[in-house]
Amino acid sequence: MVAWIWRFEKADGTEAEPAVEPEEFTTQGDAESWLGEHWRDLLEGGAEQVRLFEDETEIYGPMSLRAEDVEA
């Protein structure tokens, strides 16, 4: 079974402990929905950016959790 996993990072790219413990997701959509619900708590807890992995393969990132860094 494929697992979708978030990696939480500080601004310099070092790994950060998430303020909200994620689960292992079975779909990319579930992982992205979870992030959409928890990004503010993660940011307040010290994570500045995230990367999404499908098992060991990086799908995208780093993606900032700061709203001002997100392009419309």
Image (cartoon, rainbow, N blue to C red):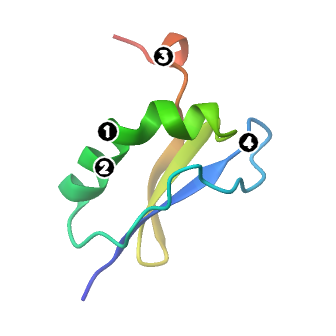
Quadrant of the image for the C terminus?
Answer: top left
Give the quarter of the image for residue 11: top right
Give the residue pinned by disc 2. 34
Three-letter code, disc 4 = Lys
Q: Does 67 appear above or below 42? A: above
Give the residue pinned by disc 3. 67
Q: Are marks 2 and 1 in contact (CB under 8 Å)?
A: yes
Which of the marked residues, 3 or 4, is nearer the chain's N terminus? 4
Q: Which mark is residue 7?
A: none
Q: Nearer the viewer, mark 2 or mark 3?
A: 2
What residue is at 55 percent from the left and 22 percent from the top? 66
Category of crowding for the residue at label 4, using alpha-carbon neighbours closer than 10 angstroms: few (below 14), some (14–19), many (at least 20): some
Three-letter code, disc 1 = Glu
Q: Are marks 3 and 1 in contact (CB under 8 Å)?
A: no
| Mark-to-mark CA distance, 2 and 1 | 5 Å
Left-right relation of 18 to 21: right
Residue 3 x %, y %: 33, 77
Q: Are marks 4 and 1 in contact (CB under 8 Å)?
A: no
Q: Foreground residue, 56 or 37?
A: 37
Residue 43 x %, y %: 58, 33
Q: Nearer the viewer, mark 2 or mark 4?
A: 2
Three-letter code, disc 3 = Ala
Left-right relation of 44 to 70: right
Q: Nearer the viewer, mark 4 or mark 1?
A: 1
Give the residue pinned by disc 4. 10
- Answer yes or no: is residue 63 visible: no
| Mark-to-mark CA distance, 2 and 4 | 19 Å
Category of crowding for the residue at label 3, using alpha-carbon neighbours closer than 10 angstroms: few (below 14), some (14–19), many (at least 20): few
What residue is at 41 percent from the left and 13 percent from the top? 71
